[in-house]
Image: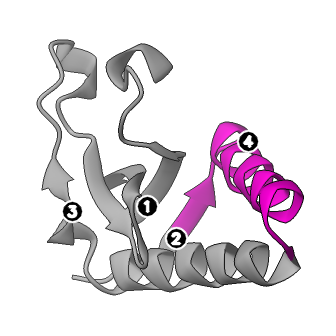
């Protein structure tokens, strides 16, 4: 089942851009570009197979349908999303070592 609509939350876009800026400042523009390409390829993989991500085990029942998938090549960074009725909502793109449930 493929997603027919994709929506990126403002927070997810900010997450992606902030991480790219951090890579640019800490390393160089090549790493930032690799990050952006990896996020894009992972998102395209999710669009093709939205059920590929693992369901999260958050305590909050409101988050019971949130899935996660690691970013290709940046395995510690996770894409969090929801998929309902062919609509994919990208929620966050964050490092997995954070207090994840508090980010929602």
Mark in the foreground, 1 or 4? 4
* Residue 3 vs residue 63, the one in the foreground: 63
Tell me the crowding category of disc 1: few under 14, some 14 to 19, or many 20 or more residues within 10 angstroms, Cα based.
many
- Residue at which label 1 appears: 88
- Residue at which label 4 appears: 10
Q: Are marks 1 and 4 in contact (CB under 8 Å)?
A: no
Assess whether residue 32 is covered by the magenta stretch.
no
- Residue at which label 2 appears: 5
Q: Which mark is residue 53?
A: 3
Tell me the CA gap for discs 4 and 3.
Answer: 21 Å
Residue 11: quadrant of the picture: top right
Q: Residue at x 42, y 27 (%)?
A: 98
Q: Are marks 4 and 3 in contact (CB under 8 Å)?
A: no
Q: Which element carries disc 3, helix, strand or loop?
A: loop
Q: Earlier in the sequence, mark 3 or mark 2?
A: 2
x then y, percent, for residue 57 = 11, 30
x then y, percent, for residue 75 = 35, 65
Q: Which residues are magenta?
A: 6-28
Evaluate whether residue 56 shows in this view: yes
């Amino acid at each position: 089942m493929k997603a027919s609509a994709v929506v990126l939350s403002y927070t997810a876009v900010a997450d992606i851009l902030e991480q790219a800026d951090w890579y640019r400042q800490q390393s160089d523009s090549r790493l930032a570009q690799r990050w952006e390409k990896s996020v894009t390829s992972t998102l395209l993989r999710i669009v093709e197979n939205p059920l590929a991500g693992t369901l999260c085990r958050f305590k909050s029942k409101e988050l019971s349908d949130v899935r996660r998938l690691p970013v290709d090549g940046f395995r510690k960074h996770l894409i969090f999303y929801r998929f309902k009725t062919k609509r994919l909502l990208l929620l966050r793109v964050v490092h997995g070592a954070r207090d994840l449930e508090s980010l929602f």
